[in-house]
Amino acid sequence: MAQIRLNLRSVTTLIVDCDHFTRGLIAQMVREFGANPPVVCDSGKAAQAHLQHHYSDLCILEAVFPDMDGAELIRWIRRQDKSQLRFVPIIVLSSYTQYRHVTVARDAGANLVLTKPISPQALFDHLAWVAKVRRPFIEAGKYAGPDRRFRTSDSPAGEKKRETDYTEVDHAGAALLEQPSGATPESRKTAIT
Amino acid sequence: MTRASKTIHFPTTRLSELVSRGGGITRELAVEEAKKSVEDLRDLALETILQAIGAIEAIAYSARLNRMDKVDMMEVLIKADHLVTIAATFGLRALEGVLKSLCDVTAGLLALSSNDAAPIVVHVQAMRLLAPDSPPLGTEQSGRILGELSRVREYFHFAPLTISRQSNCGPPEIAS
């Protein structure tokens, strides 16, 4: 099996964690993966203020901040209409006492929720997974975020095992899934009862 | 029957475009470098742990008539929670166990609206015994301390805050 290789040289990362040491630890790992020095914030409000003027390619957030719930920040990001920011991959790191926020963060639109402490291996693997595995982005009444209904991390193969078989889109939508990297985001409207 | 509209996008994020460019770093090298970098932070981590233990002790020992107010308990919980992450990152297993127990007890007391400081003070004393600058204890002695703390939790019927560590949402398997 070939080595996974990532080019994070131009990637801008936002890390939001109220603990100074943990912020530094995660930032150090991301730097060693080859990314630009991450932007770090210690509160949800500071993160919002940063994101209003700067784009980040990846957000790594704590599940709860002193000034707001992490889910609140995720929902705010996911509801940025007409902005690419709403599609930004979000990884949530939940600490020991924040365990109950795991499902809340997922339902707010996080791509991944991981528990601390996180090892360099785990962070790299999950970061690679978030970057390489394409998931449809759903905007519904109460939810905006990556499709939570996925079973495998790789492209499903074979009849009746395509992603579109369980995302309720037609074949035009399926074609978009197969578009090469660099394609502009497209959207299709469907209706559910 | 109501019909709610749902939009499905198929975005290509800038992250997925950038990571797919040529060059970059292999997983093996990235992880190795990051591990070294984390290890370089060990001294700072131990210093941070000692400062935080001191801060928790100051709060716990300032309790009067064995009573601690909610704000102080919240402060203990936040500091202990941060310490769990740092202790676990640097392999201080026994200290991690005590800190998790402290989190369980403090969160339990807060949930019960109890201001009993005794269970917290007991944990703080145990935490000091297992602090990085304290004389090292053997596995048996550490196990005995953790066993006694579990009796405190059992007395109050406090369950661990995490039922399982298998809480990561999303499989990280990727096709190379």
Image (cartoon, helix red, strand yellow):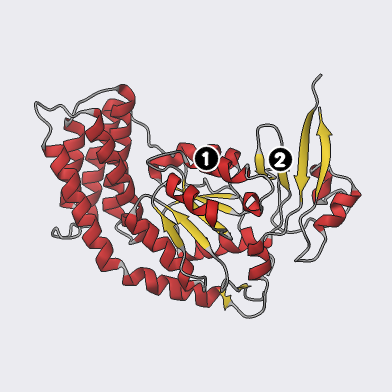
User: Callout 1: residue from which chain?
Assistant: A
- What kind of element bears circle 1? helix
Front residue of A25/B29: it is A25
Gap in angstroms between the C-alphas marked 1 and 2 = 16 Å
Residue to which mark 1 is pinned: A71
User: Do circles 1 and 2 both sit on a common chain?
Assistant: yes
Q: Which residue is mark 2?
A: A139
Q: Amino acid at mark 1?
A: Ala
Upstream in sequence: badge 1 or badge 2: 1
Three-letter residue code for mark 2? Glu
Q: How many marks?
A: 2
Res. A161 in view: yes
Q: Is residue B54 above or below residue A36?
A: above
Give the residue drawn at x 15%, y 26%. Answer: B67
x and y percent of residue B131 in the render? 19, 55
Q: Quadrant of the C terminus of chain A?
A: top right
* Image position of B128 with respect to A56: above or below: above
- x then y, percent, for residue A183: 78, 62
Residue positioned 45% across, 40% down in the render: A99
Judged from this view, the residue extending furthest toward the left is: B65
Q: Residue at x 33, y 49 (%)?
A: B82
Pointer 2 local density, CA inside 10 Å: few below 14, some 14–19, many at least 20 = some
